[in-house]
Image (cartoon, rainbow, N blue to C red):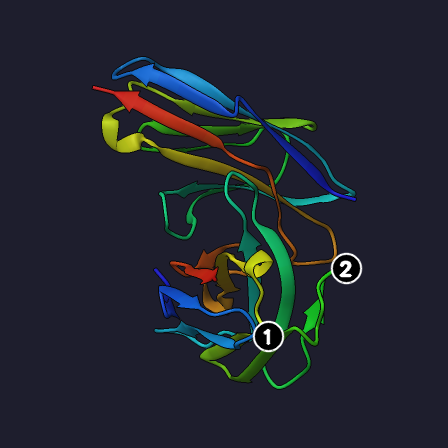
Amino acid sequence: EDQVTQSPEALRLQEGESSSLNCSYTVSGLRGLFWYRQDPGKGPEFLFTLYSAGEEKEKERLKATLTKKESFLHITAPKPEDSATYLCAVQGDGNEKLTFGTGTRLTIIP
Amino acid sequence: GAVVSQHPSWVICKSGTSVKIECRSLDFQATTMFWYRQFPKQSLMLMATSNEGSKATYEQGVEKDKFLINHASLTLSTLTVTSAHPEDSSFYICSTTWEGRGRDEQFFGPGTRLTVL
């Protein structure tokens, strides 16, 4: 059974203070690892898909990286508008099902 | 990008009543739609996968007779919670993949907050 563990559960940063969120996973044949952003009371918003170890993707202040066991979401010089819950999900070979972690609730303090 | 809408955005109902939630793909045809449930401070849990014109596939532990899914067209899927009880109170979210953008990206709707009294 696919499993995803995210840490920390919650993270408070000062504006401009860079940090990383962790996503550890076990999956039988990785088809893709996904990062989403979710604001309170809303559906997840797609950020990145990573397919193989060593791959990196960037979008504004966010960069996602992938190894065979975990993924990191690096946030550089965050702003208050980056406050949200960041979700990680994996998709195994042969199916479209996404298995989600419980997320990291990120708060950026002005 | 692709847009998915849900209606209603929130609903409050009495125990024992049925509630229907609609999920629409607004600018593309969605052959496959997914229904998730999210309890407070928990992860999204897949309930079922529906394909247009065929029966939905339910995840283990999800009662198909309680959560009725209909995917009658390429732009609309509905989830009906039958005889709802307080433990069914949750955030229900649908998603779909778009063939035109590749099947790896799932677009999510804004969610429906169900509260059963």
Which of the two residues, B22 or A4, is positioned nearer the viewer here? B22
Which of the two residues, A58 or A107, is positioned nearer the viewer here? A107
| Res. B83 mark | 1
Residue shown at the point (25%, 17%) measured from the top left:
A15
Disc 2: CA contacts within 10 A as few (<14), some (14-19) or many (>=20): few
Which of the two residues, B88 or A98, is positioned nearer the viewer here? B88
Residue A7 sits above or below residue B3 on the image:
above
- Circle 2: element type: loop
Residues tagged 1 and 2 counted as in contact (Cβ below 8 A): no
Q: Amino acid at mark 1?
A: Ser
Residue shown at the point (40%, 65%) measured from the top left:
B12
Mark 2 or mark 1, which is nearer the start of the sequence?
A: 2
Q: Position of residue B71 (x, y in %)?
A: 56, 81
- Circle 1: element type: loop
Q: Amino acid at mark 2?
A: Gln
Residue A39 sits above or below residue B85 on the image:
above
User: Which quadrant holds the C terminus of chain A?
Assistant: top left
Q: Position of residue A71 (x, y in %)?
A: 58, 28
Does any portion of residue B3 appear in the rendered image? no
Residue shown at the point (40%, 43%) measured from the top left:
A38
Relative to B92, is A18 on the left or the right? left
